[in-house]
Every structure is written in C-alpha cells, then in structure tokens.
Image (cartoon, rainbow, N blue to C red):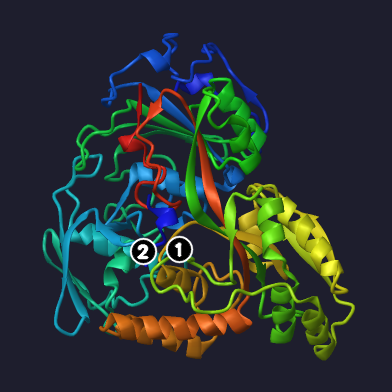
Amino acid sequence: MHDERFSGLRRRGFLAAGTGAAALALVGCGNGNGNGNGTGDDPADSGDGKPAKGGRLRAAFAGGGASETLDPHLANLFADAARAKALYDKLADFGADLSAQPRLAASWEPDKTLARWKVTLRQATFHDGRPVTAKDVLYSYRRIADPKQAYRAKASLEPIDLDASRATGERVIEFVLKRPTAEFPNVLAAFGAYVVPENATDFDKKPVGSGPFRFVSFAPGRSAVFRRNDAYWDGAPHLDELELVVVNEESARVNALLGGQIEYAHELAPTTARAHEGKGQIEIVRLRGSAMQAFCMKTDRAPFDDKRVREAFFLIADRQELVDGALSGAGVVGNDLFGKGYEYYADGLPQRAQDLDRARALLKQAGAEKLKVTLDTSAVAAGFTEAAGIFRDQAAKAGVTVDVKVGSKDSYWKDILDNGTLCCYRSGAMPIEAHISQRLLTDSTTNATKWQHKDFDALYQQAQATRDKAGRAAVYERMQRRLYAEGGFLIWGFADWIIGTARAVKGVETKAPANTLDWARFDKVWLA
C-alpha cells in the first residue's frame, strides 16, 4: 500500500539570461517582499488565511532549452508538465496516494469483461468557448498513438483499440480494449495523456486547452505566461496570472527566490533547505521520498548487455553512502525497484548491500576485470554530479574505472535516452504499472535502459488483465523479481522533493509527490 511518507509576476520583472538561465536580472520591481505586486506590503501581516484573488506568481523550473514546446503530448520534463497542467486537462490524474482521480472524466464504468469501458465527460469548455467532447478525446488519444511519433503516453495508451473505440454521445466514449484491463483508469491518468481540441496542431503560437489558465506568451527556454481562465470547470484560479520561468541553476533559483524575483522555486538541494528552513525568510516544502534516484544501465549494449556486469554494479553501490552524500541524508535507500511504498511494490525482496568481493567475481566471470565505463551526468538535477563522483569512487574499489562525463543541462534528458551506456537518472511519482508501461516495455517511448523482452511485455499484459487484485499483485511481484535480478535500473535511493516559496505564497500542497495532481498545481495557490 501507499507509504505514509508520501501522505501526510510581472512579465518584465524577471529576465533569464540565455537558455541556461544562469543569471537573473530584476527590472523595476525589486521590493524583495516576494509578492510580485510592487505594493511593499509585508505578507506576514496580510490576509486572514482565506484565499485572496489577484496577483502574478512567478515560478522557476529547470527547463529544456530552446527546443521546448507547449505540445502537451511531448511533455517530458517537470517544467513541461507544469506548463501542460496550466493549459490542459487529462481525463484523470493521480492523487497523492497514486490512485486515479476523475478530472475531465466525470465517471468510468467497465463491462463485465473489463474489455469495454464507458467514460462520461463532465461539462467543460476549451478556452475558445467550445465544449470538450468525446471527439476531442478520441482525436487526442489517436494523435498520441501515432506510430510515426514518439509521444510520451503512447505506451500507456497501448491497451486501447482506438480504431474500434467510438463516441456514443457528445460526452460519452466507449473505449474498446485489446484485452481486459482492470486498472484502465490509470491509463486515463497517464503522464502526457492530455486532451486537446479536435484537429489541434499549433501548440506554441496559440494553444487552446481546457485548463485553469489561458495562454498569453511563450519564449522557449525562457518563460511562459498564462492568465486566469474564469470559466474553468473546477473553479477559476485565485491568481490573475502565472509565469513559469526557466532557471536551470539551483543556486540561481534560490537567489531569485531570496531576492523577490520569483515566488516559487522548484527542486531545491537538501543543503539549501537546511540552510533556510525555519529561518523565516522563505518557506520550505518537503514532498517526502517522491523522487527515485538511480543509475541507468543500457542493457542492449556492452558492457551492460551481460547481466553479470549489471549484477556486479548492483553490488558495487553503497546506497547509504549515496543517500548521505548526494542527498545530504534527505531520502531513503532504494533496492533497485521503482515505487518504494507504492501499491504492488515487492517489499519482500532482501535489501541489497554492497558486496565488492562478489562484484569482482562477477566481473571476472564476464571477462570485464579491468572494465572502463563512462558515466553521463549533469547538474540538471540536484545530487546528480555528487552521486556520480561517489559511485566513481565506489566502483574503483571493485577495479572498475568510471569516467564521469558532465553533459548539458539543456539537452541532458534527450541525450541520455538513446546515447551512452551508463547515466544518472531520476523520476517523480507514478503507479508501478505506469512506470513499467512508459519505461520497460519493448515499445515504451522513454525506455532509457533499453529493457526489451517480449516475455516481460506478456507478463505486463497478464497483470493488466487479471481482475483479482491479489492475483495481479503476484504477477507484478514476478516482474519485479526479474528486474531486481537483472534489470537496468540501479535504484539507490528515494529523495525528498524540495520546493521553496516566498512567505506570501499560500495553498501549496505539502503531501503531493512530484507528477501527481496537486503537485505544481497553481490554480489552487494564492498570494497573501
């Protein structure tokens, strides 16, 4: 079950210098109070705890450079997801406990076979006033499933027979599935499965969604500005405007927050959080254990096409040292499986510990006694470069030479998807079955480990089709045992996700792991 650790602007006022956004400049609104309205009011003395209307909130995220797009079906980075969430809706999204929660879908109901699902849409409108209809949903899903494209949610939508699925009313869809699927609502909530208007193609110049904010402007690698959608089906946002700015350097995000240039800084380092927590200048929000931390081994190429080498690397890692050193202790150790604490997690497997003698023996068996390998990393995520250095030193004790290569923050995630052999990797929250469908199936579009096994694909389909929950859990455990023994993800920890906000910012959800419905949900945030 779900681990309790997970429960429980002014546009001209901010300029990011270049696509790397390492430098910040404030023009004309340097009151330093963090409220972005230029009034000079002390936020500690304003408001009565009730949501206040108005103002512009400026939120900083690491981004993807000049290649960024507002096409929600191409969303891969957290910045992409935040922009997509502002403009668009999905049929469902994941709650804090990773269960599917209705969004544009008012309800869903399977037939007795679990192979046909009736989905009824709520009454909602796009920003141009058109109603959201079943035809829009089918267009969106068929676009995502285009075999010529690599849209993020394609593997998650694979169970749907989109040729046979149809609209049975303006707001009713009959989804016909290729096989019985007990957890079909998770498909509706898949990362990137946003609903766009029928025939929509122009996403960067004038995107139209049904989300809480309307499009104002977009400069790839720099900034996106949105305005409140007063007609939003889930209630109009409290903010007048939202600006999502790209600031790749963590130190720059911190300095911008401290200087009043932004009000929300996504992904702060544990050392930053410790330095400022409880000091009164900014607020620190910790989303406990929500970020998987890993090294990704590509299983389709040397040296990691030999499972003995992969097992040796599992045994080289001192996970506690990595958590202590790379995360400053702000997390827990991992066991080479995604989703610690989530439903279906195989928590009965023994915790793997460092065993250098066994690692050396396995490398010798594989003919890789003096192995040299390049480890790709980047300052794109907190702890990545630190983790790479720690693991390099750990590997040396097993006779392995690791050459750490620091790549571009702007293109890192694109670069490591298909290139290289070993890289630093991380992930936000999603159900274990979604992690499998998006990253571990033969046709998964974000399969960074190149784990491609038809028998593994078949087990996933078997799990999906198993009506009985206990039986389904047994299949997922079987799959995880195989990944534990010979997979390509060396998952060494689960980090706290750390967000910093100005004291004036209220309504930020404190128990929503990254990637879930209430993470980066700015329609419920206000400025006191």
- The first of marks 2 and 1 along the sequence is 2
Q: Is residue 86 above or below residue 316?
A: above
Determine crowd level at label 1: few under 14, some 14-19, many 20+ residues with C-alpha closer than 10 A. many
Crowding around mark 2 (Cα neighbors within 10 Å: few <14, some 14 to 19, many 20+) is: many
Q: Nearer the viewer, residue 40 or 217?
A: 40
Q: Position of residue 415 (x, y in %)?
A: 66, 59
Of residues 337 and 331, the one nearer the viewer is 331
Residues at circles 2 and 1 in contact by the CB criterion of under 8 Å: yes
Which residue is at a point 35% across and 15% down the rendered structure image?
Answer: 46
**Where is the C terminus found, in terms of image quarters?**
top left
User: For the residue labelled by badge 2, is the local secondary structure a helix, a strand or a loop?
Assistant: helix
Query: Which residue lies under the disc numbered 2?
Result: 143
Location of residue 204 (image quadrant): top left
Q: Is residue 414 visible?
A: yes
> Relative to residue 186, is residue 476 depicted above or below?
below
* Amino acid type, mark 1: Tyr
